[in-house]
Image (cartoon, rainbow, N blue to C red):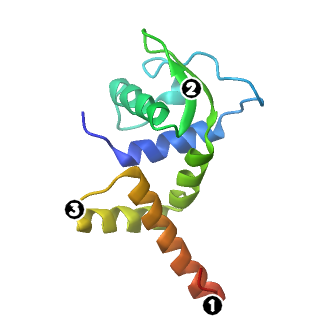
Amino acid sequence: MKRDMDLIRELLLRIESFEIEPGGTTPSLRPAFDTELQIDGYTPDQVDYHLNHLIDARLVDGQCSADHFFILQRLTWAGHDFLDSVRDPEIWRQTKEGAKKAGGFTVEILGDLAKGLIKTQIKKYTGVEL
């Protein structure tokens, strides 16, 4: 299965919206059954695969059981940073377009590219170069 950065972004936005008490977790969630993890245009297997990668990449603190139930604790600092850099739909579009033209990317490169685009916007609106 190929990594889908649009799905990763959507999952991070979804997880960020969960009401999780400090130190708490979500109830056990399974992409095939729980609407919180169902994303239009994606199968439960795709969501499951990408959630595992979000945990592996340490963008999300959580666990997946052998029967594909997820218990999520929170976005990590890195998860928040990545999401904040790609939150704006126009920045996200430009980020993906730039990465596609370059011929490849990683999560880190996408985040860096998005941050560069944000810095350009800051300079445009404030005159301050970061």
**Mark 1 vs 3, N-terminal side:** 3
Say which residue label 2 marks: 62
Q: CA distance from mark 1 to mark 3?
A: 32 Å
Q: Please, is residue 117 above or below residue 38 in the view?
A: below
Q: Residue at x 64, y 34 (%)?
A: 74
Secondary structure beneath dot 2 equals strand
Percent x, y of residue 129 = 59, 85
Residue toward you, 19 or 118:
118
Residue 43 falls left or right of residue 77: left
Q: CA distance from mark 2 to mark 1?
A: 41 Å
**Mark 2 vs 1, N-terminal side:** 2
Q: Residue at x 53, y 42 (%)?
A: 12
Residue 36 falls left or right of residue 109: right
Q: CA distance from mark 3 to mark 2?
A: 32 Å
Give the residue at the far right of this rendering.
Answer: 22
Q: Look at label 2 and name its amino acid.
A: Gly
Residues marked 3 and 2 touching at CB (< 8 Å): no
Residue 121 falls left or right of residue 17: left
Q: Quadrant of residue 109?
A: bottom left
User: From the image, which quarter does the N terminus lie in?
Assistant: top left
Q: Residue at x 45, y 32 (%)?
A: 56
Q: How many marks?
A: 3
Which class describes the residues within 10 Å of circle 3: few (<14), some (14-19), or many (20+)?
A: few
Say which residue label 3 marks: 103
Q: Quadrant of residue 66?
A: top left
**Mark 3 vs 2, N-terminal side:** 2
Q: Which mark is residue 53?
A: none
Secondary structure beneath dot 1 equals loop
Q: Which mark is residue 127?
A: 1
Percent x, y of residue 63 = 53, 21
Q: Quadrant of residue 42?
A: top left
Q: Look at label 3 and name its amino acid.
A: Gly
